[in-house]
Amino acid sequence: MCVPTRYDATREDLAELLADQPRFRVDQVLHGLYDDLASPAELTTLPKALREQLEAALPPALRIATEKSADDGETTKWVFSLADGAMVETVLMEYDDRVTACLSSQAGCAMGCTFCATGQAGFTRNLEVGEIVEQFVVAARAARPRRLSNIVFMGMGEPLANVDRLFDAIRRLHGDLGLSARRITVSTVGIIPGIKRLTDFELPVNLAVSLHAANDVTRTSLVPMNKRYPLADLHDACAAYVETSGRRLSFEWACIDGVNDTDLAARELAAFAIPLKAHVNLIPLNPTPGYLVRGSTLARVREFRDDLLDYGVNATIRRTRGVEIDAACGQLAAEVVRERIALRPR
Ligand code: SAH
Ligand code: SF4
C-alpha cells in the first residue's frame, strides 16, 4: 500500500493515532467517517487542531479528476486519480426504486476481454480496501438525500482477481456503512477459485458471471480467461454457488452482431442457464476503439430475449445508462484508451 488512507484505517489504527486524546474520540471519528460520511475536516465536534491533524494523517484515497452527469442528472460518472496517479472510475445511477453505484476493484484489468475498454487498456494495479470503500462514500454523498441502496462491482477490473481486498471492502460496506450484503453484486469473468471463495464467504453477496458465449470456441475468442477456466468447470462452480448459497445467479451477455446473438447461441445459452436457474441480463454492446464488431441492433436483442423466454430462461434487457459520458459499465476506461491509442507511436 502506498499511504494508508482514511477508509483503510481500522479502529486499532485510529486508537493509536488518537492515543493522547480522550477515549471517546475514536468513536466520534468512526461515527463521523462511517455514519455521516464526513471527512476529518468536517468533524466539527472535534477541536480544530485535531481536525487538521487527522486530515493530514488520514488523507483521502481519491481525487476527483472529472465528474460528468447524464440522463437528466440521474447518472454521474467520476474519474478518480489515486495517490500514485493510477485512474479508476465510479458511476452512480438513480432509478425510481433504487440507487446503484458501479464500483471499480482494480485500476485496469489483466483479463484482456477483446470487446472491453478496460481490458484493452491493460492492468495497472489492484485497488486497496480504502480505495474501494471511498468510491462508495463519494457516491453515497452525491446520492443524498436519497440513500445509496445497491452496489455492483462492474466498474474497472476483475473483482475476483483482487479477492482479499474485495472481501475486506465488502465487510466494511456491510458492517460499517450499513449496506446489506444482499444488495451487493460481484461480477466476474469466471475466475473459478474466486467463485469458490465467494461461495464460502460469510456474507450473502450476489454473483453475476459475464458469460457472453456458451460454447468454448466463441467464449475463448471473447474472454481469453475461458481457456484456463472452461465452461464445463465454470458450470460446476456456478452450480456449487447456487446450491450452497441458495442465492440467484445471473449471467451477463453483451449482444454482439452475428457473434453471440444467433438462434444457435440462444439455444446454447438456454442449455447452460436452465439447470442453474440463472437470470440472464442482456446488454447491448457498447462500442470500443479496440473491437470493431458491432453490437446487435435493439430489435435483434429483443428477439434474442424472446427466444430465451420461449426456452424458459428468465431474461431481461439491461437499460444502458450514461452512454454519452462513456459511463456504461465495462465502458469506463474508454476515454483513457482512446487517449492511449492516439499517443501510440505509429
Ligand atoms: N471484470 C468483471 C467486472 C467488470 S466488467 C466482469 O468482467 O464481469 C462489467 C461488465 O461489463 C461485464 O459483464 C463485462 O463483460 C461488461 N462489458 C465489458 N465491456 C463491455 C462492452 N463494450 N459492452 C457491454 N458490456 C461490456
Ligand atoms: Fe476485465 Fe471484466 Fe473487462 Fe474482461 S470484461 S477485461 S474481466 S473488466
Image: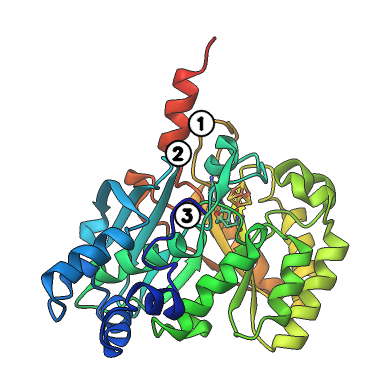
Is 217 drawn above or below residue 207 in the view shown?
above
**Residue occupying the point 43% across, 49% down:** 88
Task: Locate residue 235, reporting x and y percent.
Answer: 82, 69
Q: Earlier in the sequence, mark 3 or mark 1?
A: 1
Judging from the image, what secondary structure is the residue with disc 3 in?
A: loop
Q: Is residue 251 above or below residue 296?
A: below
Q: Of residues 73 and 104, which is closer to you in this image? A: 104
Query: Which residue is the site of mark 3?
Result: 329
What's the residue type where badge 1 is placed?
Pro
The secondary element bearing badge 1 is classed as loop
Tell me the residue at 39%/81% (across/down).
177
Gap between marks 3 and 1, in whole Å? Answer: 16 Å
| Circles 2 and 3: CB atoms closer than 8 Å | no
With 35 as the anchor, is 133 left or right in this view? right
Residue 320 appears in the figure: yes
Q: Residues within 10 Å of mark 2 (few under 14, many from 20)?
A: many
Q: Position of residue 43 (x, y in %)?
A: 18, 75
Q: Are marks 3 and 1 in contact (CB under 8 Å)?
A: no
Hey, which quadrant is residue 133 in on the image?
A: bottom left
Q: Which residue is mark 1?
A: 289
Q: Which residue is mark 2?
A: 334
The quadrant holding residue 72 is: bottom left
x and y, in percent, of residue 161 in the image: 66, 57
Q: Amino acid at mark 2?
A: Ala
Residue in the image at 71% along x and 47% along y: 223
Disc 1 under 8 Å from ligand 1? The reply is no
Residue appearing at x 75%, y 41% in the figure:
221
Foreground residue among 283 and 325: 325
Mark 2 and mark 1 residues within 8 Å of each other at the beta carbon: yes
What amino acid does circle 3 point to? Answer: Cys
> Quadrant where the C terminus lies?
top right
